[in-house]
Image: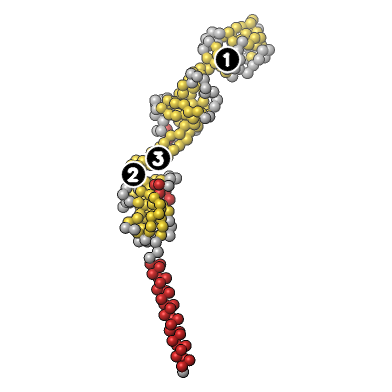
């Protein structure tokens, strides 16, 4: 009988110890605190940077033609050489006699592909004389991007490792056959550092949302068809439903019951629920 009583007392003691352990675990779960990082909600323009590329060409060029086909007997110039208007550039033997060919304008010789002794027709130019004191960058853009380029607007052009200032010329109101608009950008080239035929790059900023509430894109979560963020309020995570206006890689513009005084959780929020206790360990603005 005594052994039975001892076994019963031991069993009751073990049950009491197990119950205490469960209560302690429950208390620990109730008081669990999640470490999070936050960033202040800001009000600003949401912008996207777009890059455009175009070919650099002389501002103007004139062809050098001959009246009669014949053999190029003498060449006085070569590609890249500077000539003045009416300078003799070549002589051509034709059926009606030798003809002297002169430059139609001041500029640089370009697209000269013949040599002495070659036959030259009068259907193709013998060469071109180009004005390279100013060059033009031609950029093809869509209808939606056309508004970024306004006449007389100054833009920065990147060519190789250098940057130049250029001015947007008045835009042709009609698109080309492909439905795109040709933008011409005039760049000063008096020092002749820019070589025609190279490629230039322009970056432009387009405002998607003006003076909107911006949060880091990683702060916006989705559940079913709802978008929401967590803000910190009195040491707890508060779930706030929001409407996404525009999303970009870094920031998203939203509408909802939040303002610029709120701190939105950007890290550690995937395991949170509404009302979870949180501890801010690092401010996202100071990363």
Q: Earlier in the sequence, mark 3 or mark 1?
A: 3
Secondary structure category for the residue under label 1: loop
Residue assigned mark 1:
81
Taking the image as shown, residue 222 lies to the left or right of residue 104, namely left
For the residues carrying marks 1 and 2, which lies nearer the camera in this image? 2
> How far is mark 1 from mark 2, CA to CA?
57 Å
Q: Nearer the viewer, residue 150 or 262?
A: 262
> How far is mark 3 from mark 1, CA to CA?
46 Å
Give the label on residue 47, or none: 3
Image point (44%, 86%), residue name: 9
Q: Is residue 8 above or below residue 83?
A: below
Asked whether residue 68 is in view, the answer is: no
Q: Which of the 4 quarters of the picture holds residue 5? A: bottom left
Percent position of residue 30, x then y: 38, 67
Percent position of residue 224, x then y: 41, 58
Secondary structure category for the residue under label 2: strand
Image point (42%, 47%), residue name: 287
Question: Crowding near pointer 3: few (<14 within 10 Å), some, many (20+)?
Answer: some
> How far is mark 3 from mark 2, CA to CA?
13 Å
Percent position of residue 196, x then y: 54, 23
Image point (31%, 49%), residue name: 261
């Amino acid at each position: 009988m005594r052994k039975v009583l001892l076994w019963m007392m031991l069993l009751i003691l073990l049950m009491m110890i197990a119950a205490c352990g469960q209560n302690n675990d429950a208390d620990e779960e109730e008081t669990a605190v999640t470490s999070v990082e936050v960033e202040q909600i800001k009000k600003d323009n949401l912008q996207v940077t777009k890059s455009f590329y175009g070919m650099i060409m002389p501002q103007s060029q004139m062809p050098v033609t001959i009246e009669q086909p014949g053999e190029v007997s003498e060449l006085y110039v070569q590609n890249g050489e500077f000539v003045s208007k009416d300078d003799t550039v070549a002589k051509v033997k034709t059926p009606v006699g030798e003809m002297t060919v002169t430059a139609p304008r001041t500029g640089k010789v370009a697209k000269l592909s013949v040599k002495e002794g070659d036959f030259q027709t009068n259907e193709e130019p013998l060469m071109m004389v180009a004005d390279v004191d100013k060059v033009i960058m031609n950029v093809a853009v869509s209808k939606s991007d056309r508004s970024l380029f306004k006449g007389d607007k100054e833009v920065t052009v990147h060519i190789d490792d250098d940057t130049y200032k250029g001015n947007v010329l008045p835009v042709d109101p009609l698109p080309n056959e492909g439905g795109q608009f040709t933008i011409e950008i005039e760049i000063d080239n008096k020092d002749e550092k820019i070589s025609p035929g190279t490629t230039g790059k322009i970056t432009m900023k387009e405002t998607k949302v003006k003076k909107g509430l911006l949060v880091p894109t990683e702060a916006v979560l989705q559940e079913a068809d709802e978008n929401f963020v967590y803000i910190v309020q009195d040491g707890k995570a508060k779930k706030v439903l929001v409407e996404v206006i525009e999303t970009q890689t870094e920031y998203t513009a939203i509408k909802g019951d939040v303002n610029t005084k709120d701190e939105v959780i950007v890290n550690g929020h995937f395991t949170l629920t509404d009302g979870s206790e949180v501890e801010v360990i690092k401010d996202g603005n100071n990363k």
